[in-house]
């Protein structure tokens, strides 16, 4: 079997380990340091087609979450928020407008 190492920020370890566990994927975590000295963790997993699919989905979800949007309406400008955050803010604003 071929193993691969995936380096992630230490702050993301719990989230990624729980996502791997939900897919019944075993991973071993090794503490390491990133190039800039930040805390990082190397996850060692066995390379399988399921891992490749999982990693592609995880990467896609991460990139979508980090995609920044710009919104401008009636002089109010929001920048650097994700689509999900912008949607949540808009829903809260609508609730405030509808209240008597």
Image (tube, helix red, strand yellow):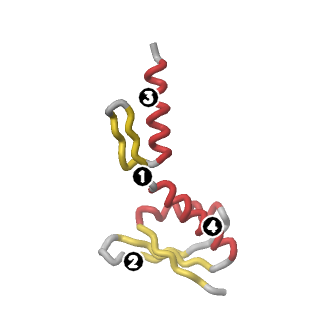
Q: Is residue 17 left or right of residue 76?
A: right
User: Quadrant where the N terminus lies?
Assistant: bottom right
Q: What residue is pinned by disc 2?
A: 32
For numbered disc 4, what is the local secondary structure? helix
* Residue name at image x 62 percent, y 64 percent: 21
* Residue name at image x 48 percent, y 19 percent: 98
Q: Relative to residue 26, is residue 83 depicted above or below?
A: above
Q: What residue is pinned by disc 3?
A: 93
For numbered disc 2, what is the local secondary structure? strand
Which mark lies nearer to you, 3 or 2? 3
Sooner in the amino-acid sequence: mark 3 or mark 2: 2
Q: Quadrant of residue 18?
A: bottom right
Q: What residue is pinned by disc 1?
A: 68
The dot on residue 54 is 4
Query: How far from the left and from the top, in percent, is residue 96?
Result: 44, 23
| C-alpha separation, residue under disc 2 versus residue under disc 4 | 23 Å
Sooner in the amino-acid sequence: mark 1 or mark 2: 2
Tag 2–tag 4 contact (CB < 8 Å): no
Query: How far from the left and from the top, in percent, is residue 32?
Result: 39, 77
Pointer 2 local density, CA inside 10 Å: few below 14, some 14–19, many at least 20: some
Which mark lies nearer to you, 2 or 4? 4
Q: Relative to residue 99, is residue 84 depicted above or below?
A: below
Q: Between residues 86 and 73, which one lies in front from this camera angle? A: 73
Pointer 1 local density, CA inside 10 Å: few below 14, some 14–19, many at least 20: some
| C-alpha separation, residue under disc 4 versus residue under disc 1 | 24 Å
Tag 3–tag 1 contact (CB < 8 Å): no
Which mark lies nearer to you, 4 or 3? 3
């Amino acid at each position: 079997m071929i193993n691969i190492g995936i380096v992630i920020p230490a702050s993301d370890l719990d989230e990624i380990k729980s996502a791997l566990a939900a897919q019944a994927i075993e991973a071993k975590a090794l503490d390491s340091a990133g190039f800039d000295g930040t805390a990082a963790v190397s996850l060692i997993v066995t390379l399988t087609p399921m891992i490749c699919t999982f990693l592609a989905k995880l990467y896609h979800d991460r990139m979508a979450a980090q995609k920044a949007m710009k919104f401008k309406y009636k002089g109010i400008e929001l920048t650097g928020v994700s689509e999900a955050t912008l949607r949540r803010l808009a829903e809260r604003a609508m609730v405030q407008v509808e209240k008597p």
